[in-house]
Amino acid sequence: MADQWDTFNTEHKYAGNDVKIRELRRKTKLKEGYIVRYADDFKVMTRDHKTAWKWFHAIKGYLKDRLKLDISPEKSKVINLRKQSSEFLGFKIKAVPKGKKYVANSNVSDKKKIQIKETLKERIKRIQKQPTPENVRIYNATVLGVHQFFKYATHVVHDFKDIEYRLLRTLKSRLSKVAKYGFPNNLKSKSTYLRFYSGKRKTHKIGDNDYLFPIGEIRTTSNFNFTQSLNPYDMSDHFSWDIEIIKLMKSQIPSRSVEYMDNRLSVYSMQKGLCAITKKPLKAEDVHCHHKLPIYLGGTNEFNNLVVIHKDVHRLIHATNTDTIQKYLRVLMLNFTELKKLNQLRSLCKLEKVVAV
């Protein structure tokens, strides 16, 4: 695909790739196309029907002749987006007129809407049988997950109102004996619930203070282009804290209270997934939530007493053995500012300052 345009070798050396493409489009009969890809699933956008079929046969021939791969007849086809919609990664996309131009309308695909509805039904049944904080977290992680994924669809509000409407009877009949329906109250301003939702819609409360995330409360989020030089598979540069927070929601720490688990998520969200000491992105599996004032010294699980840090930083904060301290100092290689912040947390734990040797 790249050889058709981006890496196409020309006798004349152009000032830049954008200039080269502009000139090739104007002076040659090369088939113009724009590829949108995620892993092995991709679309090629063209300006007209004839060019689309050229691309179709070129791609089909290459896959068959060079890679010995057959395409799927059901999934691989040429579609006029002005007349039909096309599905991609769970989205349904169609070009519609707006003034003198066409714009893309996008929805959650019909198949994905059914899948979301069935998954949430199973989560609701599980809460009915066992109305525990753990099952509430699993349900909320599912709702937040699909909201975060599909919030870029232009008509996502309509789609999730439809899903919510179709689940109203299930929610009412299944949870009538284990939940109270009403507006969320007694929520702290920095709770996870209020991080993502307004609190102005009625929902179900399970137990003392566990609220189900509202299915229908979602807004379209604008799409922004990434730089074309960004490689989404280079994980050293690519980090999505909102995806990691969903993993944290599914994690379990049986010995911890609901307040701790809720505030742990809120702190991670506030810090945008960055370690409070090193400011480096934290994967869910590396997250440790530290009590600034330890519980044994009178500290609490309140939001203001918690800070999210890397697990190795946490070990260093509590380390008392000299060899252990030097080991983690070598691993972390903290600068002056980072070491100062770490020692401030150690002092709250009544521990001596550490110095890199």
Image (cartoon, rainbow, N blue to C red):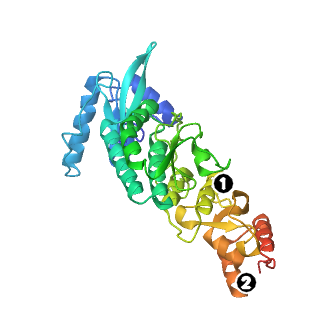
Q: CA distance from mark 1 to mark 2?
A: 28 Å
Instruction: Please give the count of numbered marks on the rendered protein.
Output: 2
Residue at the spot of label 1: 271
Left or right, 121 with respect to 77, comes to right
Q: Residue at x 77, y 81 (%)?
A: 357
Q: Residue at x 48, y 38 (%)?
A: 151
Q: x, y (%) of residue 310?
A: 63, 67
Front residue of 313/158: it is 158
Front residue of 103/330: it is 103
On screen, 109 above or below 179? above
Q: Is residue 115 visible?
A: yes
Left or right, 55 with respect to 166, comes to left
Query: Please, what is the three-letter code of the amino acid marked with disc 2?
Result: Thr
Left or right, 66 with respect to 230, comes to left
Q: Residue extending furthest front? A: 177
Q: Quadrant of the N terminus?
A: top left
On screen, 231 above or below 133? above
Query: Please, what is the three-letter code of the amino acid marked with disc 1?
Result: Gln
Q: Residue extending furthest top? A: 100
For mark 1, does the 10 Å Cα neighbourhood hold few (<14), some (14 to 19), or many (20 or more) residues? some
Q: Is residue 329 visible?
A: no
Front residue of 72/263: it is 263
Q: Earlier in the sequence, mark 1 or mark 2?
A: 1
Left or right, 150 with respect to 110, comes to right
Front residue of 137/207: it is 207
On screen, 271 above or below 319? above
Q: x, y (%) of residue 133?
A: 50, 59
Classify mark 2: helix, strand or loop: loop
Q: x, y (%) of residue 42?
A: 34, 41
For mark 2, does the 10 Å Cα neighbourhood hold few (<14), some (14 to 19), or many (20 or more) residues? few
Q: Tell me where residue 83 sits by quadrant.
A: top left
Point out which mark residue 320 bears. 2
